[in-house]
Every structure is written in structure tokens, then in C-alpha cells.
């Protein structure tokens, strides 16, 4: 045992308080849950449950405040503080530091759900016991994720309040042997990629979105347990749409962040982490619309679907959490969290709530018991005797079968909707959203399927996602368009014919015009893809046209229909913008004269990278690019790139300047940040793919000359040019030389081609006079090249040349890529309109 | 026929389609041996870069070509030609996935994924 070190300057009170508060957080959630569930039969427990609920909220807020205090005061003895912040950090990123790590983002999630619980509990009336019981149950489970205690050998959660010297990954660090280590210790700091304002707003929006799916979940469980399919719809409706709005904003902020500040090359990459926030949103859209229909029909239509979607959104939030935080995605995602050793805990979390859902759906008491008993049995067997995969599959099978059996019960006393009714088509639309979400989550889960069945499948490519999503979206937008004009119960089409026909013609005209402008002809996509893009353009334009038309005419008479028309047209615009900018994203390709060095490469057509040497002009697409200089500002290196256009008279006109940058952090590595020039109809997106970040003006000496021996037309590679021995000529023939005199002057023509294809020539000479050799040196000043003819070999016709390079003349260069995203502003416009529509809807509901 | 059955059939059809897509998708994680056996198929090869061998990136000649050697998970080493610029963080990367096809003895990759210590994640970097 090493001697116990008396550490100085540690603030142990903070950690102790933190652990205490975390324990209170967990215990109060659990006690509140239990008392709420008891209060269903014994109302006297209700006040106790509420006290614990408030306690839970206070604990969550206190932990939040405490950890912020610790970060602000640089308590680097704590691992979380050390890992996510440092002394030089700007205090505006204080919050970002808090939720950069996994534990912090769990805390954010817990905080939002605690806040929502506090807001909602008084409004629930008789629904309070079960609804709040379920919500507190979730809180209890979530709280274990940041407990950081051991139950036997099993570690429960990962704490925010662990000391560096107690953390198993860091406790052996040498500086911890010094009792005064805190004097000099600085934190590792926030990842420079995350040190921007996006990181301040994106996670809270996203986690508020995740947290808000809990309300429809808990309320639907209440409905199922109490066979009360109607009472909860009114409140559930608001929260479902709130969730659609906030989660939507969170996801789109993520997309905007990726587009503006990260070099993913777009706003959406179908990365598992992105998908796992999209899927709950899609399901929430399905849930919220089913709730609307059910609200209209007094809880009598699509009971199963409504409850099923409402619970699924939250279950998918849990499943996404499992995917992104358990480390199971491995190589499939670039930005999943790493495994904190909580795979088992996360797995139990999700299985427990799936069991709760399936149990709640069973109407038959016996089936309920059989399901729970068999599930518990499988789980126990899996833990005791192993064969986890088999038991997991059997359990999944049993759960699905149980759900299907229960479905029948809900369907029995329902009549079918008329296929000309509005509700029928909204249900179909909602179902398409659900199907879309299932397709995405299935593809995203390929790493899980690999693990279960021992497959070795690589992730599905973005193109495959698009190919599946395009046809589903086509139907969705057609429904979004025409269902506005349908009536509840039954629609009389004779009145509608004219309107629908006019809309169809207008849409067809607009689509043709747009397809003509967008011009798919030179696109590399396959014919089927192009065709399906055109069909989707048609259906999104139709949805916009139909909804705007509705908005202008019908909504005047009935103001309650306005928000839906606004939100739907916004959503259609969003997808239209996404479709066009993604499918017609074009690279600005380098254009080089045929003499250029680049043409030596055979696959030049595939070239995307543009090489810019400082000061030179390179033609790329319609532009002439000039790389001017680089500037270092702390950890960031900016590269100044000018975009010129050529006027008719052949003069160059500066169009705009971009500053793509590279973040160069000693601890986190290098990361390229793009810079984008926004125009009304397109964006020009530029990012550095390769650059020398150091200052280049270090050496001024010539390199040691190197000798090269070769024939005429042979090539020598210099650092910044290709050198060719072009030709040799003498002032007299060799025979004359042998016969007559002893004087000879041989000139070697050296041709050098620089990166922009410019040709330079030098003429070193080999002079023989009075039997003495006088080699002369020739220089290409622009490239810093120096040539001396060393020796000639008349027999083999070889020439030996000494070449030296002056590295000061080696110009700085960057390799970059540039793309045009057309019509991307439609996407942002669509986002704004959709959000406004949802906001109008919510304000309308709250006022009513 | 009830509408619900038509819908159910459509859903089942979509489901089968999706599963088929994922099963038919030819790309799999593998090693150089398997990739050599089927040169027409695309593979994702997981491995580590070989520090003993030279890496060539000469943007003056071709900014879209980077050559290095990769040791796959069963220890086989092959030359990889990546048809992209050299990733800025390549030298720091620990684990690499290259995506492409085998061409004779070299692997022609059109894309690369890298797991770097402490990037996008909070893995301890305690060296």
C-alpha cells in the first residue's frame, strides 16, 4: 500500500454534496413513483408523492447549479470538470462544458423531465396518480445513470462528482502523486469543435424534445391501464405538438450546425446519431396527428394506433439512447459517445419500459400476468444460464405476439372509417410516418443485428436511405396536400373536383419549371433516382400549393385551420429544399490546362480536391480561386480564399472571399470548419481538406544538390514542380568535336511544370574549352530550382544533372473542396414556416 | 376485403423489401483476404495503419491520392490507395475503416473513417 497522500487545496465538500444530492435525486424519484402509484387506490398518498416530486426537482436544479459552480471555479480535482473545461475557457461556454459529456447530458435530460413533471402535475386531475407515477418511474431509472455507485460488483451509472484520483482511468496519472497537484493542474477543456454557440442551444433543444415525449408516453400508459382512451387526449395533444416543434427545432439546429460549422459536407448524413433523434420525431408526428383525430371522434377511432404511437416515440428515445451511448455502434458512427460501461444498465432500462408498454396493452388480466411472468423468466434465465441472444430474441417474439393479440381486442368494437373521410387519410399519413421511422431505425440498427445474428454487414449507404425515403415521402406529401380538402366522416367529391384539378395543373406547371431550372440532365444519378426526385418535387410542390391555397381561402373563414396549413406548407418546403440541395449538390471541380501536372493523373475526372498554391490563380468551375494567406488565431488557422469571376472583357472581378478554417488543438487533433457564401438561390460551401498549419518561412537555404542521371524526356520530381529533361543540343556535332577542335558547348534544356501548369525553362550548359570542363549553372528563380550539368555519358546518351531547391521558394499551398448547394434557403425558410405554424397551433390551444 | 388487411399487406411488403435491401447490400466488414477473393465486391476493412511503411501524399502531383499501408484485424498488411486527400488527423488515428475494392495487391478506397482518441467523444486520453 502506498503511503496516503495529504492532498492540498481540494474542495471535497463539493463532491460530497454532489453525491448526496444525486442520492436524493434518485430516492425522491423512486419514492414519488411508489407513492403516486399507491395514491391511485389510497388518495392519502398523493400529498406525499407531490412532496417527493418537488424534492426531486429541487435536487435536479441543485445538482445543475453545483456542477456549474464547480466548472466556473475550476475545481479540476473533479474528473468531469477537468475533462470538459479549462482555465482559459470563455465563460460563455460554461453550459456547453456541462453537457459536453455523457453524464452532463443525462443531467440535462433529467432536469427537463423534472421541470415538465412540475409544470404538468396539477393539471392532470384524476389522471395524476398513474401518469405521474410512470413519469417518476422514468426519472428514477434515469437518475441511476448518474449515480456512480456500486451495487455489489455492478457499477450503477457514472457520476459527475468523481475525483480525478478516484477515477479508474486517471488515478494512476503521475501528477496525482504530488500532494500539491492542484496548483498547476489545468483542465483538458472543451473540444474546440464544440466551442461555439450551437453547442449552447442545440443540446437543450434536443433534450427538451426528448423529455417532452415522456408526457404522451405516460398519459397513453394511463389510458391503457385505466381503459380511459379519451380524457388524456386534450393535454396529450398539446404536449405531442410541443414535442414535434421542439424536437424538430433541435434536429434542424443539429443539421444547421453540421452544415455551417462541421465538415460533414452537408446538413444530413444519415449518421446513426442523427437518425436516432429523427426517428422519435417521425413517430411523434404520427402520434400527434392520431391524437387530433381521436380528439375529434371522442376517443373512438384508432385507439390502438394512437396509444401505440404515443408510447413508441418515448421507447424509441430510449432505444436511441441505448444505440448512441452503449458503444454498440462502434465503427458505424463518427460521433457516438463512447461506452461508459453502462450497456447492461441501458439495456435493462429499455427492456423494462418495453415490458411496461406490452403489459399495459393487454386487456386480459391473465395475459398480463403471463406476459410479465414469462418476460421475467427469460430475463432471469438469460442472466443465470447465459444464451443471452436467444432469450432476447424469444422475449422480443413474445412481446410482438402479445401486442398483435391485444390489437385484436382494440379493433373489435370499432367501425371502419370511410375512405373518403379526412380521418382515414390522416391515419394513413400517420402510419406512413411510422413506417418511415421503422425503416430508418432498422437500417440504423444494423450493428445491433450484426451482434445478435453474428452478421458482418456494413452500414447502409446514405443513397439507400434516400431511395427508401423518397417514395414514402411522395405519398406523405400527396396526403398532406389533398387531405386538407377532405371532410371529417365523408367527403362529397363533386364540389372538390374543380379545386383539385386546378391545383394539379398549377403543380404540374411549377414542377416542370423547377425541374427545368434544377436540370437533372447532367446529374450523375441513375434514371430511376432522377425520376423519383422529380416525382417527389411534384408532390412537395403540390403539398405547398394546396396548403397555401387553403391558407388563403378557407382559413379566413375558420381561423382554427390556419396553423395546420402554415405548418404543413413549411414542412413541404423544407423537404423540397432538402431534396434539391442534396440531389443537385455539385462539386466545383478544378479546371486545368492540358499541360498541367494534374492531367498526368488518369482519373482526373473524378477529381474533387482543388490544390491552391499561395498567390496563384486556379480556375475551378466558373470561378478563379486565389489562396492569399493564412492567419493563426489561438488554436484556429484561417485560410483566406478569394473567389474571382471573369468579366466579358476578360478581367478578373473579386466576387467574395471565404475564410475556411482548421481548428488545431493539441489534445483533440485537427478539425476543418467550412466557410459558406450564402446567395438567395444557392450556397457556395468551401472546406479545407489538407493544409500545412505551420508557418512555412523557416528555411532559406538551398537544399544539398542531388544528382539525377537519365535520358532526354526523363522526369525528376521536385518538391513543387515536375522537371523534365527536355532536349539537348550542341554547337557542333560530336564528330566535328572529335575531329576538329577541343571546344564544345552543350546546352541542356530543362523544363519545369509547376502545379498550376505553368512552364518554366532553364538552360544549364556543359562547356569544354581547351580540354577543361566548365559546367554552368542555370536557375529557375520562380521555383527556386538550380541545375548544374554534372557529367555526360556519350556512350549511353545519359546526362547527369545536379539539382538543388531553395525551400523558401516552396510556396505554401492548401487542398480544398468546394460545393454548390442550390435552393438550400428553401429548407431554412421551410423550417421557419413550420415552426411558426406549430407555435400558432400551440398558442391557439393554450388560449382556448 | 377490409381496408385494414390491405394496409397490413402493404406494410408486410415494405417490411420484406427493407429487410431484403439490408441483406442484399453487398458491403460488409471484412479483411484483405476476403476482399482479395472477391475483387468485384465492396468491403469495409477495419484495421490499423502501418507505421513502419511509408505514406505518400503528394498533392502537387495528385491531391486526390494518398497511399499508405494498412494492417487488417487478422494481421495482414496491404497497400491502400485512397482516392481522396490525406485526412488531416490521419497521423493521430488509432483505428481506421477503409471502404473500397481490392485491385490486385492494392486496395482502392474511395472513403475512409477514422476513430481518433478523444474526438467527438470523451474517451480518456491517458497516455
Image (tube, coloured by chain):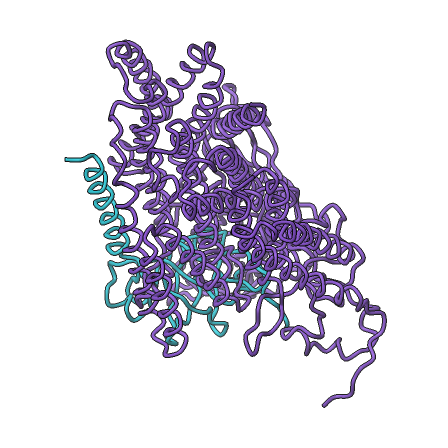
Chain colours: A purple, B cyan
For residue A141, say whether it is visible: yes
Q: Quadrant of the C terminus of chain A?
A: top right
Nearer to us in this view, A108 or A442: A108
Q: Is residue A342 left or right of residue A508?
A: right
Q: Quadrant of residue B72?
A: bottom left
Q: Is residue A705 left or right of residue A568?
A: right
Relative to residue A239, is residue A163 depicted above or below? below
Q: How many marks?
A: 0
- Residue A369: image x %, image y %? 36, 61
- Residue A704: image x %, image y %? 61, 65
- Residue A30: image x %, image y %? 59, 59
For residue A810, say whether it is visible: no
Residue at coordinates 53% horizontally, 41% vertically from top-left?
A126
Residue at coordinates 40% horizontally, 52% vertically from top-left?
A360
Residue that extends furthest to the bottom in the rendered view of this protein: A1
Q: Quadrant of the N terminus of chain A?
A: bottom right
Nearer to us in this view, A145 or A91: A145
Q: Is residue A257 left or right of residue A172?
A: left
Residue at coordinates 21% horizontally, 45% vertically from top-left?
B13
- Residue A156: image x %, image y %? 57, 69
Amino acid at each position: 500500500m502506498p503511503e496516503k497522500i495529504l492532498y492540498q487545496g481540494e474542495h471535497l465538500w463539493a463532491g460530497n454534496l454532489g453525491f448526496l444530492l444525486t442520492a436524493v435525486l434518485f430516492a425522491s424519484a423512486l419514492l414519488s413513483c411508489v407513492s403516486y402509484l399507491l395514491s391511485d387506490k389510497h388518495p392519502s398518498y398523493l400529498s406525499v408523492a407531490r412532496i417527493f416530486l418537488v424534492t426531486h426537482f429541487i435536487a435536479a436544479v441543485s445538482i445543475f447549479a453545483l456542477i456549474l459552480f464547480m466548472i466556473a471555479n475550476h475545481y479540476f480535482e473533479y474528473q468531469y470538470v477537468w475533462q470538459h473545461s479549462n482555465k482559459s475557457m470563455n465563460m460563455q461556454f460554461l453550459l456547453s462544458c456541462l453537457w459536453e459529456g455523457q453524464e452532463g447530458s443525462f443531467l440535462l435530460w433529467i432536469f427537463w423531465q423534472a421541470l415538465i413533471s412540475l409544470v404538468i402535475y396539477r393539471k392532470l386531475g384524476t389522471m395524476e396518480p398513474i401518469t405521474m407515477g410512470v413519469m417518476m418511474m422514468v426519472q428514477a431509472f434515469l437518475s441511476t445513470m448518474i449515480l456512480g455507485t456500486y451495487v455489489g460488483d455492478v457499477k450503477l451509472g457514472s457520476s459527475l462528482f468523481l475525483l480525478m484520483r478516484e477515477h479508474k482511468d486517471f488515478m494512476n496519472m503521475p501528477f496525482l502523486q504530488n500532494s500539491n497537484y492542484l496548483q498547476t493542474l489545468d483542465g483538458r477543456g472543451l473540444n474546440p469543435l464544440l466551442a461555439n454557440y450551437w453547442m449552447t442551444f442545440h443540446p437543450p433543444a434536443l433534450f427538451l424534445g426528448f423529455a417532452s415525449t415522456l408526457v404522451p408516453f405516460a398519459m397513453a400508459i394511463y389510458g391503457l391501464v385505466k381503459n380511459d382512451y379519451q380524457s388524456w387526449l386534450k393535454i396529450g395533444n398539446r404536449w405531442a405538438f410541443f414535442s414535434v416543434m421542439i424536437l424538430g427545432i433541435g434536429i434542424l439546429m443539429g443539421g444547421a450546425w453540421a452544415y455551417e460549422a462541421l465538415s460533414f459536407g452537408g446538413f444530413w448524413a444519415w449518421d446513426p446519431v442523427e437518425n436516432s433523434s429523427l426517428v422519435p420525431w417521425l413517430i411523434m408526428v404520427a402520434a400527434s396527428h392520431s391524437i387530433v383525430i381521436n380528439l375529434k371522434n371522442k376517443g373512438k377511432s384508432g385507439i390502438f394506433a394512437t396509444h401505440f404511437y404515443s408510447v413508441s416515440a418515448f421507447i424509441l428515445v430510449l432505444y436511441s439512447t441505448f444505440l448512441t451511448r452503449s458503444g454498440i455502434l462502434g465503427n458505424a458512427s463518427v460521433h457516438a459517445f463512447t461506452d461508459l460501461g453502462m450497456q447492461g444498465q441501458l439495456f435493462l432500462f429499455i427492456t423494462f419500459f418495453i415490458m411496461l408498454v406490452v403489459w399495459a396493452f393487454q386487456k386480459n388480466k391473465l395475459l398480463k400476468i403471463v406476459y410479465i411472468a414469462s418476460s421475467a423468466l427469460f430475463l432471469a434465465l438469460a442472466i443465470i444460464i447465459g444464451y443471452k441472444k436467444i432469450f432476447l430474441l424469444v422475449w422480443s417474439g413474445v412481446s410482438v405476439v402479445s401486442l398483435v393479440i391485444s390489437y385484436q381486442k382494440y379493433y373489435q368494437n370499432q367501425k371502419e372509417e370511410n375512405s373518403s373521410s379526412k380521418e382515414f387519410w390522416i391515419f394513413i399519413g400517420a402510419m406512413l410516418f411510422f413506417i418511415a421511422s421503422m425503416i430508418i431505425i432498422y437500417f440504423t440498427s444494423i450493428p445491433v443485428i450484426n451482434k445478435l445474428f453474428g452478421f458482418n454487414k456494413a452500414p447502409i449507404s446514405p443513397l439507400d436511405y434516400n431511395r427508401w425515403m423518397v417514395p414514402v415521402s411522395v405519398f406523405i406529401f400527396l396526403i398532406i396536400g389533398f387531405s386538407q380538402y377532405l371532410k371529417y366522416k365523408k367527403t362529397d367529391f363533386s364540389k372538390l373536383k374543380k379545386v383539385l384539378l386546378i391545383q394539379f395543373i398549377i403543380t404540374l406547371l411549377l414542377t416542370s419549371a423547377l425541374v427545368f431550372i434544377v436540370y437533372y440532365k447532367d446529374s450523375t444519378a441513375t434514371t430511376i433516382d432522377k425520376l423519383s426526385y422529380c416525382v417527389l418535387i411534384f408532390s412537395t410542390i403540390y403539398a405547398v400549393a394546396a396548403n397555401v391555397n387553403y391558407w388563403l381561402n378557407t382559413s379566413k373563414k375558420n381561423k382554427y385551420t390556419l396553423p395546420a396549413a402554415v405548418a404543413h406548407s413549411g414542412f413541404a418546403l423544407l423537404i423540397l429544399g432538402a431534396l434539391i440541395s442534396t440531389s443537385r449538390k455539385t462539386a466545383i471541380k478544378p479546371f486545368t490546362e492540358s499541360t498541367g501536372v494534374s492531367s498526368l493523373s488518369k482519373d482526373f475526372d473524378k477529381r474533387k480536391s482543388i490544390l491552391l498554391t499561395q498567390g496563384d490563380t486556379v480556375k475551378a468551375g466558373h470561378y478563379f480561386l486565389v489562396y492569399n494567406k493564412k492567419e493563426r488565431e489561438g488554436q484556429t488557422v484561417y485560410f483566406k480564399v478569394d473567389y474571382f469571376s471573369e468579366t466579358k472583357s476578360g478581367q478578373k472581378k473579386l466576387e467574395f472571399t471565404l475564410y475556411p478554417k482548421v481548428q488545431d488543438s493539441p489534445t483533440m487533433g485537427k478539425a476543418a470548419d467550412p466557410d459558406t457564401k450564402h446567395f438567395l438561390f444557392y450556397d457556395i460551401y468551401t472546406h479545407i481538406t489538407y493544409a500545412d498549419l505551420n508557418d512555412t518561412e523557416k528555411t532559406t537555404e538551398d537544399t544539398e544538390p542531388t544528382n539525377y542521371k537519365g535520358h532526354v524526356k526523363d522526369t525528376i520530381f521536385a518538391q513543387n514542380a515536375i522537371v523534365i529533361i527536355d532536349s539537348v543540343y550542341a554547337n557542333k556535332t560530336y564528330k566535328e568535336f572529335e575531329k576538329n577542335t577541343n571546344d564544345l558547348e552543350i546546352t541542356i534544356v530543362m523544363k519545369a511544370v509547376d502545379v498550376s501548369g505553368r512552364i518554366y525553362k532553364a538552360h544549364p550548359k556543359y562547356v569544354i574549352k581547351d580540354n577543361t570542363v566548365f559546367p554552368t549553372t542555370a536557375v529557375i528563380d520562380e521555383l527556386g530550382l538550380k541545375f548544374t550539368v554534372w557529367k555526360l555519358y556519350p556512350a549511353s546518351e545519359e546526362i547527369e544533372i545536379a539539382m538543388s531547391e531553395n525551400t523558401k521558394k516552396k510556396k505554401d499551398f492548401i487542398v480544398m473542396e468546394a460545393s454548390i448547394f442550390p435552393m438550400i434557403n428553401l429548407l431554412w425558410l421551410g423550417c421557419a414556416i413550420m415552426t411558426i405554424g406549430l407555435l400558432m397551433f400551440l398558442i391557439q390551444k393554450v388560449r382556448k | 376485403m377490409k381496408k385494414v388487411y390491405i394496409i397490413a399487406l402493404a406494410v408486410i411488403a415494405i417490411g420484406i423489401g427493407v429487410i431484403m435491401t439490408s441483406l442484399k447490400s453487398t458491403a460488409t466488414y471484412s479483411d484483405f483476404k476476403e476482399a482479395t477473393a472477391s475483387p468485384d465486391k465492396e468491403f469495409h476493412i477495419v484495421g490499423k495503419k502501418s507505421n513502419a511503411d511509408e505514406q505518400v501524399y503528394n498533392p502537387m502531383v495528385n491531391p486526390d491520392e494518398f497511399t499508405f499501408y494498412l494492417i487488417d484485424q487478422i494481421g495482414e498488411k496491404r497497400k491502400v490507395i485512397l482516392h481522396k486527400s490525406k485526412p488531416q488527423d490521419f497521423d493521430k488515428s488509432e483505428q481506421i475503416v477503409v471502404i473500397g475494392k481490392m485491385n490486385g495487391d492494392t486496395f482502392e478506397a474511395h472513403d475512409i473513417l477514422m476513430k481518433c482518441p478523444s474526438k467527438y467523444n470523451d474517451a480518456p486520453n491517458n497516455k
